Amino acid sequence: MKKNILIAIAILLTQTVCFGRAFTNDKDNGGKSVYQARLDDADAVYFTPEKFNIKADGKTDVSAALQQAIAEVKTKYNFGVLFIPEGKYLVSKTIYIPTAVRLIGYGKNRPQIILAKNAPGFQTADSTDKGKAKYMFWFVSSLSKPGEPLHDAGASTFYSAINNINLKIEDGNPVAVAMRAHFAQHSFVGNVDVNIGNGKAGMFDVGNAMNNVRFFGGQYGIYTTKPSPGWQFMMVDTYFEGQREAAIKTQEGGLTIVRMNVKNVPTVISINPNYHEKLFMENCRFDKVSGPAIIISNGENAFNQISLKNIDCRNVPVFASYRRSGKQTAGTGTMYKVKRFIDGLQMDSLNADPVYKTINDVEPLSVFPEPVKKDIPELPAINTWVNLKTLGAKGDGTTDDTQIIQDAIDKYATIYVPQGWYRVSETIKLKPNTVLIGLNPIATQFLIADNTPAFGGFGGPKALLESAKGGQNMVTGIGLSTNADNPRAVACKWMSGENSILNDVKFIGGHGGLERPVKQSEPKKERTGIYSKGYNGADPSWDTQYWSLWVTDDGGGTFMNIWTANTYATNGAYFSNTSTPSHVYALSVEHHVRNEVRFNNVSNWNVYALQLEEESRESTECQPLEVENCSNMVFANLYTFRVIRVNKPAPYAIREWGGKNIEFLNVHNYSQIKYTTTNPLYDINSDTEVRPWEFARLLIDDNNPGPSAGKITRLATGFEFANGICTDSKGNIYFSEQRMKRIYKWSASTRTISLLADYPWEPLSLACDKNDNLLVVFKYVPKPGFLVNGKPEEFKNPPDASGTSFSGWGNSGFGTLVYSIDPNNPDETIQLLKKEPMGSVNPVYKALYPAHRWRDYHDFNTISVAKATECFVAPDGVTIIPVVYDLARSTALAQAYPGKALYTTDEYDKRTVSLNVSPEGYVSDLKYFAERGEFDTAIDDQGNVYIADGQIYVYNPAGKQINIIKVPERPTSLTFGANKTLYVTSHNSVFEVKVD
């Protein structure tokens, strides 16, 4: 007996030392309740026995009533809060949570929702379901009517949440997953314990952010594909214990993880085979991990970016393993700290060549350290909160509530702001200890009406909400709206100190707005939103206010789950003149005209999961990120994205100057179209461009001058986006500008350039047949009213369009066709090429395939070798272009000669592959050749392969890199002409490179 007591005491002490507190086997009431009493809100729905005839006894099935309560919030208010009091609630089927509805628990203990034992349908996986599972809670974009298909959460599923509620899966539910959460901005899961038990997982598909969530048991804590709509996923203060296979299984999850504790698992992070991941982890703890802690799939690929800092390990014998190479990184003794583990494409300075490498900086430990202190402060005791509406505020969007709000702030420290739209007409100024608490930033707003006198006319920036200098302010769950026509307006001026927090705040205006349902007695409302004024082009009110969020005067603290997409503002976030240590967790800034985010004279900041998006109508010429005179900063998992509708190039994602000790970790600069921002970073003072679109690490320390471009001749410049380069048998060069609908010729004999054609068809790619006819793949858009055989002309997307998101979002309804011209008489010889069955030309002289494919649904390997059924036949009768959907996006054509290797690029995975070519022009036997690639390749007489990827990388036929050709601008297409001359297009120029 005495021996058993000593063992129990030892186990308890071990748990306390490792994790700062003891975890019991009973996790039903785990985690501190954030809201320990009922909050009164006339616009909320309360899931109580009085209203829904339920029992919170853990025995009575409440599934139907809970779904009814959620539907009431959505149908009555369109957005809002369902409060769930303390108790145990039994469910037996999937509960659907639509856009902008939040489930929030309250009471001395968190409420717990329990999936019943042997719940119907939770025993066998649905083979057609994406997650091969059945879900307790499923976040959806909208509630479906009976018989309608489900609408999974996606890119426009905003403001949804489960908060302060524990979840439990009982036995007998092997395919049960607690949550499916593929939602977007301002949606989150927070303050939740998930007891998975023998179920499958706590969550499938992640989105936006997670905070203070613990997972116990399950095959996985989380397993996920790419978040909506391709952003990062921010995880702060999480705990995983006892998963049977891995704490997290992922592919393209953009996992940005801070303070994650993991115990008793085979693996912490498992990346699916042949998928990349952008994994950032900091200040984490791994304890008793029996297998490799991190399983890496696509090593030495630019898309694969692994950056880990300060990972404390105990009983972790293998820290990392690599699927493709079979290599392992062993642990260092029983206890050790991984100070830095960075694997991927890295640049040690601005002018350093990018190289694939692994940094593994480890130190042994004699004592396992305490967990890193959290930087997210707890809310004040709920009995100190004062309800703003009980003080007389209306929140009806019309009444001026300014004085009541300011009087409340002057008198009380902590103010609960129930749902409502509170109109103000003057700056709301916080005291040093003011705390403002809302629970849904679309339902709870502070707003100013258009042309409010205090914010109109000419003058300096004037804040709607202003924090106290050096204060410990907390503002959470509130939207701030400066409307459209208030030119002096700043939504929030933040000067609070290191221990302050701005959390779950939406800067409203333009994108992401929602309206309440119109009552039958009310007149129909005019359309609201960024495009509501009916202008065909730019709204004159865009870009006429100051910044939405302005952090200045040594302001700082913690900024978490913030979305700022107000096109009427100069930019979404401006950080200036501060050295206060600060952290940003999940900041989404989008849709501004000139600039998204600016850092000016900022030091000691860590910015995690900053996401920038440029929309076509307002942001085509926007500069996403500017970093000026900053130091001691880290940007981790930085995503810069241009939407599929953008039709013009942009030069730089980041402009930087005067920086020191700025580290970029895991940078993702991308678009589904060819107009990805040309270069991810430009240093102004040194005139240095950073070319790799994807990289794991760049350190800016001293502004060293960039390298010389070498002996390269610029033949012509002044183009918008030159690409599609090809050559004929005489050495003449042809290239095009798609949007400008122009085709150019460079004459090898006269060494002059001429405009060959400017027909009203967008050229997509070019090639020459055996007889030097120029072949033009082009975009054909049918005209309304034009009939073919008595029916409107139409083009439907073929089946192979389904593997790329490029085929959506408006990229349909057009035909990808081919015409030919005689370059010596183009205007009189234009003719449309006919389609013939594949195999009807045998043997072919050459087949022309897309030089690159964007297959973001990960089917590149199969679609590349799929046999086309039709082909376009050139005038020479022996050159063919197989009909495949990817011709619609490809900017160049790769020449497939029977019996020779064909090289094409998996643009999404940044990989060049080789294929064999049959006499009929089919391709097969795909093999990985090099982990680089963008738009084009070229092959010289010795079989060396030239790959355009920021610079030009030269590989021998065996796939070994043998040279780098540094060109003054980012290359877009390549071809060899006469006399061993390589011709290169960039966005703006055409170059000639003499190759030895």
Image: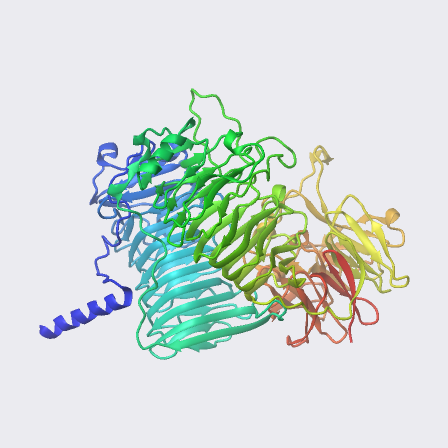
Whether residue 155 is visible here, answered yes or no, is no
As rendered, which of 511 and 663 lies closer to the eye?
Answer: 663
**Considering only vertical position in the picture, is 779 above or below 516?**
below
Question: In the rendered view of the protein, which quadrant contains the C terminus?
Answer: bottom right
Left or right for 679, reference 476: right
- Identify which residue, 662 or 522, lies in the foreground: 662
**Which residue is nearer to you in this view: 836 or 969?**
969
Q: Position of residue 347 (x, y in %)?
A: 58, 69
Tell me where residue 690 appears, x and y as whole percent.
Answer: 63, 63
Q: Position of residue 86 (x, y in %)?
A: 23, 44
Q: Nearer the viewer, residue 608 or 270?
A: 608
563 to 390, vertically: above or below: below
Counting labels gives 0
- Quarter of the image that includes the N terminus: bottom left
**Whole-percent x and y of residue 105?**
28, 44
Residue drawn where x is 48% and y is 76% of the image: 326
Decide if residue 393 is in sight here: yes
Looking at the image, residue 356 sits to the left or right of residue 380; the answer is: right
User: Please, is residue 944 above or below residue 877 in the view?
Assistant: below
